[in-house]
Image: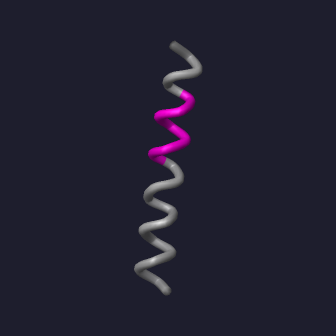
Amino acid sequence: HQKFQTLLRGSAGLKPTKILKRGQA
């Protein structure tokens, strides 16, 4: 389950970053 949670955290961390970059760009 730890690996699954890590994947969720990774996705949650990357998605907002991409959205912010697109918004600023």
Residue at image point 51% right, 75% down: 21
The residue shown at (45%, 77%) is 22
Displayed quadrant of residue 12 = top left
What number of labels is visible? 0
As displayed, is residue 18 above or below residue 14?
below
Main secondary structure type of the part rendered in magenta: helix
Q: Which residues are magenta?
A: 6-12
Q: Is residue 8 magenta?
A: yes
Residue at the spot x=41%, y=80% of the render? 23
**Measured along the vertical axis of the image, is residue 9 above or below residue 24?**
above
1 versus 16 height, above or below: above
Q: Position of residue 15 (x, y in %)?
A: 45, 56
* Colour setting: one colour
Q: Where's residue 24, x and y in %?
A: 47, 83
Q: Position of residue 11 (x, y in %)?
A: 49, 44
Furthest-bottom residue in view?
25
Residue 2 sits in quarter:
top right
Note whether 9 is above or below 5 in the view shown.
Answer: below
